[in-house]
Amino acid sequence: MRLSTSPTGITLRTRLLISLVMVGGVVLALLGMAGSISSQSTDRAQAVLDAQVQPLVVLHGLKTRLHRIRESEVKLALTQDFFAAFSRHERLIAERKAFAEALAEMGGAPSATPAHVLERVEALWVQYDDALVALGKPVMEMRMDEVARIATYDTAVRFAALSSALDRVAEETRLAAVESVEQASLAQHRQWRNLRLIAGVGSLAFVLWVIWLWRALFGRLLALKAAAVTLAAEGRAELDTSGHDELSALAQAFDVMQTRVQAREFALRGAQGELEARVLLRTSELFDANTRLLREADERKRAEQQLALLSKAVEQSPVGILITDTEGGVRYANPAMLAVSGDPQGLVIGRLARLFDPAVTPPALVSEMLRRLEAGHDWDEELEMDRPDGTRYWAHVSLSPVMESGGHTTHYLVLSEDVSLRKAHEAQILYRANHDALTDLPNRVLAMDRLNQALLHAERCAGRAALLFIDMDNFKLVNDRFGHELGDRLLINAAHRIRGLLRAGDTVARHGGDEFLVILENVGSSDAAANVAESVREAFAEPFDVSGNEVFVTLSIGAALYPDDGNTSSALLRNADLAMYQAKDAGRNSWRFFESRLHDATAARMEIEACLRGALERGEFRLEYQPVGDTASGRIFGAEALIRWDSPVLGAVAPDRFIEVAERTGLIVPIGDWVIETACRQAAQWQRDYDPGFHMAVNVSPRQFRSSEFAARVAQLLSQHGLPAHTLIVEVTEGLLLHDPAEVLKIFETLIDVGVRLAMDDFGTGYASLRYLKHFPFHTVKIDREFVRDIATDPDDRVLVDTAIRMGRSLGLTVVAEGVETPEQLEILRGFECDLIQGYYLSKPLPANDFQPFLDRTRVLSA
Amino acid sequence: MLTTTALAGTQADHAVAAVKQLVAEGALSAGAALRLTVKQGNLASFLGEDNQLKIEWEAATGTVIDARVMPQLASRAFIRRDDAVDLTIARSHETPDLVSEGLVAPLTPLFERFGFSLPDAPPDGYVHVRQQALFNEQIVAIPADGDSALLYLRRDLMDDPARQASFQARFGRALAPPRTWAEYQALVAFFDRSAEGFFGALEPRDTLTGWMYWMPRFLATARPGQYLFDESMRPAIDSPEGIAATESYLATLAHSPAGVLKEGSDYSYTLPLFLAGKGFSTIITVAAAKLANNPASQVFGKVMVVPMPGRVVAGRVVPHPTLIYGNNLVIPARAQNKALAFLFAMWLTDPDISVRSVGGAGGFTDPYRYHHFDDPRIRAAYGGAFLDVARAQLPYVAPAGTGLPGDAAYLKALSENLSLAAHGEQSAAEAMRKTAIEWEAITERLGRQAQIGHWLRFRAAFPVSTSTPMPAH
């Protein structure tokens, strides 16, 4: 029998060693690669954490700080105590500083967010911060209305822009995180592919090794077995004992078995010992492999601890956090979320989140949220939510999809924060901005908004709307008599009374001062508006009880209709205002509809007013002088100064057109002052050149007359120009005497102390002329031209003028007849012993340059 | 009772140990909440900068502080309305009404139970125990804010050589801080430029707080020993002294902005004007020094404080300041955790803790223990010169209000009549006559004999040093 031998001559031990080394190498390589992949998988999990969750937490922290700043400034606007305001402002400064530091820290940290987005956020923060800085000055001056204005109109927009920008950063961060997750996924995929390839090669090598071992070992052993069987059966077997390996030696030993049993056993024990050494070596290698596996398990544990830390942070976060599956079923809710939503812990998990429940949240909103989330986008909004107990609250809700490594959305992350307090404060500020603090009625701003809405509605329905402009006739007197506090209470009571007369849909607003607006929607005709105006007017017939005082006030009401009296709110307001003034002119305690002619007259007055401003400085005024003559002697007694206005725009404007405007605007005071000064200067010159007794009469308007320094100014001008006081005649009309006669009398007495003479102009045109002549210390009375004009033909006028002259003389007054144009008129007046005449019979009004020649050729009145 | 009692450890340690003892005995649950409600301006003082004091208290005792901001209401109205408060604040003059109407708990039993006291002597006692803490010889409040009135003047204008020369020529004496109200009025008129928007006096004159500015005038004008009432509770203000005080009160109006008469125009109206450099003088507590001493203030380095005007005795001034605001800690009768509230109050007003409370940023609690005036941190915040004047004035500080049950009604009558006079609707004499009549009616309504007892006890709180000239400083 022959055993095949190793053709290479390599011993079996060597072959076994080589095989073990090869198998061990493959196993070690596989273990190493699997360990590497496991470690890198842990790193990638951490990277996903860093790239997706932590930046979102940082950003949410910034938004929380931002909302805290906003809440602080809103609270600041509501603070009334100075020390409290100062403290709150200091706190706001600290919060601003903290936000700026957090923002800088975020900008300085490595981030996937594009630099230009962060720069945009920083720029918006600078803008918002600048607006917040502006709060400092009004706070220190306790101008809380200004603080409220800044909080409402300046910072609110910048806050919203910055908040939106932070949302954009979150979106950019999320997109960058998704990209990094995809890259990590690709890398992991490649690694697993390599591992599988190496594992395949290793397995193939193992199979080849087993085949080779089968052939190299067991084939020869079978031959040896056959030899042994043969030996047992035949006594001795022939074996090929050539070769150099162990089996050859075995064959040789078997060959001499009977004789060298001990030698054979020894050889077998040697082989056994050698095999045990190999086993020990293998055991050592397995121990090393086990150690590496333990190390890898430790690394996995550390990763799990990090995840537990994050979980704890989420659990203790003051921000409500909810995690749902993609069907909206709640998988997790932290305590803050349960506290905000009022949901009980045990009943939430597994149920549909209220946010996604169409029965709680509007279905369209739910669809919009799901559409964005399914598209992989965030969703951010402030919502008014219901609690299970029926109470409602405002929440700032942020939704984000949570994605696994493959980019597939597995859950939704919901962040919710209760912002009810801030919303309530903002609503309060908005209410204050739109309502009058005293009466709690809508203010002018809100009224205009309501009026615009009413006009839109009327336009759509082809209907009518009406605007009533209400003004209290004697509110100033109430204020002056009872003080501002009672005046304010009267306004509050009046507002209630008007409000009580109107429909719920109508608007009553305070336009300012003692003015109210009423906006009537859907008025079918002007009669309906008229009925309301009349009922409001009548309602004020009853007195008001203001702190125990019975106060009567009446109203003047102007009404304007849409579209009849205007198509815009501003036009209606203007026209209702005009109509109100017409009601006042008609004697007050009445109402009037707008008439277009009023508007035309007003437009004309406004044009005059515009041209009138600056006319004095531009030298557009001049004086003309109409002589006044002595009836008996024919001598020129003096002149009346008459103002003329040559407007480069309007041309020559008659005094009756512009004096009223000047009076109303107050421009009459400087113009009148110029008139007196010019007339005084001219009179002084003519006294020097013509007659030391020359008199100058000037017309003084009521407003100029009542100005506090009028008398002192007259005295100054007399002194300045060296004009004897008694040669200046101040002419006033009866209108001046109608209001506050006591004050007028006081000024009269002051002027008399100065020495000037006082004349009543246009006598006979007023209401109670005779009484005024008796009660006021006039020196002169001027009979109006209306009576003089027909004196020669109308017996009634003749009797009137005769009576007036007699009465004036009986009171010791000098009587002047105005408008004398004919010798007949002069003759009659002379017969009535009228002292002086004025009119075209002597001369029309003349410029100063023409008056001097007139004086030179003074005509003697026809005898 | 007012002397120091030996405690185991500091006042703060004692308070913390007492809380732990209560918890150990089961008298207080672990994690119990103390519901503290104070004004927004005091919150930072009571909780510390960045809530440090709150955190320390909670860590030391295991209890929590549920702090809230008090609405803008008088303490009487607030405590009546809100029953969820363990500890809050009340002004000194409010305590008689609060106690007599059963709205706050008497504290003497708690002091005795826990072995505390209110020391009132230097070096670190409370400065105004008698004026702030007592009613009918019982402790009813724990002082936590030393608000006495001080006179603020524009130092830069006082130091101006041209103005000094002009003043000398006009009044025949040197330009100097006023010793009396007459001198004050002369200064106010001298510096007034109302037409240019610079006002001689920026004293509030609204109905709610007007009495605070009348009271020191009356005390300075009255004869020594003449108080608001005589020993039979007959008003002493319908007198030449009362009328003179009222005329002094009204005289500044010609040199003040019209807004001071508007309702609600308290220091929140006048102080911003003064800090904006629009006035020569104002009267307020030392809290304003914190603002004037701020480098960002427009009047930084331009302001001085001087003692309140008073009278001159032997050529030296005896000032007559009064407490005006003064927030003290009180425990509502309906409080659920009275013991915890009391122990926190004692912890907060501990000598060391209170220094941090008063000296911290963001709060406006004024020094109320003697050593506060020497603490470097507090001196840096307020300005040392301001505190020195406030301290020198301490012995002369009179209590606030009438000290009587019905104080709100008495002060309302006084303030409304002063307001009518300020609006020109009645004379000073008429204001005093009508106030006296109304006071008599209030006294009759509350019971004259009972009121006499209260009044005689309250008079003991007036300083005995009002006849002793103030030392030079």
Image (spheres, rainbow, N blue to C red):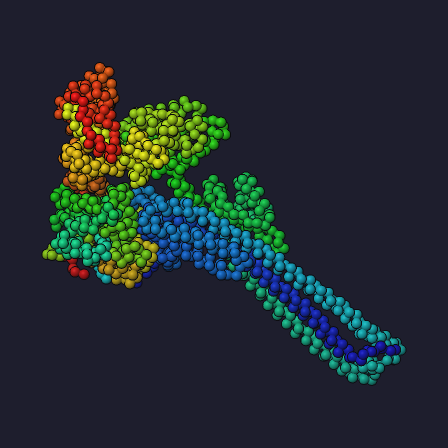
Which residue is farthest left?
B314
Q: Residue shown at 87%/76% (left/top)?
A: A230
Does B414 sit left or right of A437 as displayed?
A: left
Position of residue A271 in the picture relative to residue B318 (left or right):
right
Where B454 sits versus A697, above or below?
Answer: below
Q: Quadrant of residue B440?
A: top left
Q: Position of residue B93 (x, y in %)?
A: 24, 47
Q: Nearer the viewer, residue B166 or A50?
A: B166
| Relative to A431, B89 lies left or right | left
User: Residue B176 location in percent, x, y?
Assistant: 17, 56
Q: Nearer the viewer, residue B225 or B269?
A: B269
Query: Which quadrant does the C terminus of chain B fall into?
Result: bottom left
Residue B336, compared with residue A551, is above or below; it is below
Q: Could you tell me if residue A67 is visible in this image?
A: yes
Q: Is residue A496 visible?
A: no
Residue A203, given in percent of the width and then of the height, sits at 74, 66
Q: Where's the N terminus of chain B, which quadrant?
A: bottom left
Residue extending farthest to the top is A795
Side of B343 where B216 appears, left or right: left
Residue A622, horizontal then vertical, whole percent: 27, 35
Q: Kindly identify the residue that appears in the image at 58 percent across and 63 percent down.
A: A43
Of the pair A452 and A753, the residue shown nearer to us: A753
Number of numbered callouts drawn: 0
The residue positioned farthest toward the front in the image shown: A857
Q: Residue at x 40, y 37 (%)?
A: A445
Q: Quadrant of residue B241?
A: top left
Task: Residue at 55%, 49% (x, y): give it.
Answer: A378
Decide: is B152 above or below A20. above
Out of A659 and B22, give the one closest to the viewer.
Answer: A659
